[in-house]
Amino acid sequence: MSVSGDTPEGTDFGSDGPDHGDGTPDPIRGWISPDDRLWRHPSESMSAKHASLARFGGADSDRSRPSPWIVGGAAACVAGALLASGLVMATSGASPDGGGPSRATTTSSLVALSTPPTTEPGTAQLSSGTEMAHMVAAVRPSLVALTVTRPSGVSVATGVTAESGGIIATTAAAVAGARAISFDESDGTRTPAQLVGSDPTSGIAVVRVPSDLPVADFDTRDPVPGSMTMAMALHSGFGRASAPHSSVYAGPVRSSGTAVGVGGPASRFAVTTVDLPLSAQDSGCALLSGTGQVSGILDTTQTQGDATTGVFLPAELILGVTLQLVAAGTVGRGWLGVEASDINGTTGATLSTVAGGSSTPNGATLDAIDAEGAAARAGLQIGDVIVAVNGEAVHSMAELRTRLYADLPGTSVVLAIERSGSLGNTSVVLAAGGSGASDGDSSP
């Protein structure tokens, strides 16, 4: 792979988007100032570039913290209130013998777990039903029910409001081949929506709806494996002029911060897998963090025996890709010019390996460096382990790709590097991809 870039300094180790075809520029395209958005992509945070390396001397603080809540006996308190709001509740729990997730069930109330989750760390605290109801109520106004019409038929999906002005993030698969896209207003009125852009590599698409809906609050931290979490979908009403209805699911997190071998974006990026009784109609549904923020959207589901696992694209990737699709209709990627693998020599995991609570690798090891690339010019060496980008921890090759994917060429990033047992920072200016850079290769 051949890439180019300017030589950064200070290392410790060494336009407007396209129109619609009628000559009229799209008024939504173009850069949106961070001051005009309700969120910032991690690469835009100046403070992150000066984050302390202390958190990388041991276990990641975000991963080691106890989950703030778990679905348990307190669920009975919230079930009535949630059901009264038209919510369908479903859970996926652990088997009593601790051998793995039990069969997913859909019920009229939240089922109390008899044992902790089977994955590490397996500890959590009960949250009150009131807190859970507040989480659902906070996210619900930021979701939309999408109906996608193709020559082959009609499908449904959920979208999450990622930016003011009716900017909705969903999955690329949900809108692929769409002849028409519409969304349901709160009164059940079905209104046309417009596809702004789609990025099949990351699996994310952006739709614009003619309603200025509340923007969702996003959480870019990885969920803690073994903790309980919730997902929320929004579906079209049951009849003409019927208001859309919500479905809420609860289950344990299997893995986060690494890829899983199920194909598509999940095989390249740091996804989160959760045992939830989901279906294809829940595509694009929101994964909720313990604080009720959106930490991902559903890309696909996998079924093994009686268990169904949801694979969620992470919030950081969603925000970065959305920003670029709104600005230009496509994603321009800055390239580091390296090939890397997980610190244990793997490049990802499978659903069978993460089910047993296997620990996530900590860092991405550089296996090859393009001699003319940005990494080489910054003084990086084969064998270096990248453990953070702009102060955000990197636990795997997939997480390194996720952190860098939506950064434009010319973006300066600060990498935390472990070399021969020592930690240090180095600044790298990402370059434009060379002729050898493709969507399918292993180089970020």
Image (cartoon, helix red, strand yellow):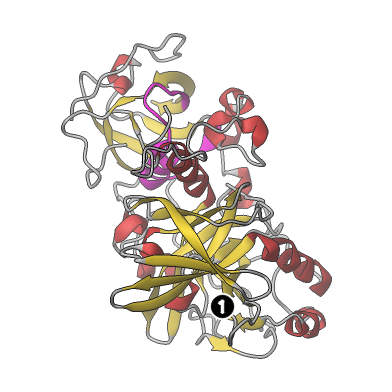
Q: In the image, residue 309 lies at what x, y percent?
A: 45, 73
Q: In the image, residue 24 lies at what x, y percent?
A: 42, 38
Instruction: Judge whether 122 appears above or below 430 on screen.
Output: below
Instruction: Judge whether 256 appears above or below 320 on screen.
Output: below
Question: In this view of the protein, can residue 165 be seen by the observer?
Answer: yes
Asked whether 409 or 276 is in front, the reply is: 409
Instruction: Judge whether 175 appears above or below 314 on screen.
Output: below
Q: Identify the residue shown where x is 47% and y is 9%.
A: 10
Q: Is residue 408 magenta?
A: yes
Q: Amino acid at mark 1?
A: Ser
Q: Secondary structure at mark 1?
A: loop
Name the image quarter holding the C terminus.
top left
Q: Quadrant of residue 341?
A: top left
Question: In this view of the protein, can residue 258 be seen by the observer?
Answer: no
Asked whether 194 or 47 is in front, the reply is: 194
For label 1, the residue is 236
Q: Is residue 370 left or right of residue 97?
A: left
Q: In the image, residue 3 lies at what x, y percent?
A: 23, 24
Q: Is residue 362 left or right of residue 18?
A: right
Q: Which residues are magenta?
A: 391-415
Q: In the image, residue 312 lies at what x, y percent?
A: 47, 61
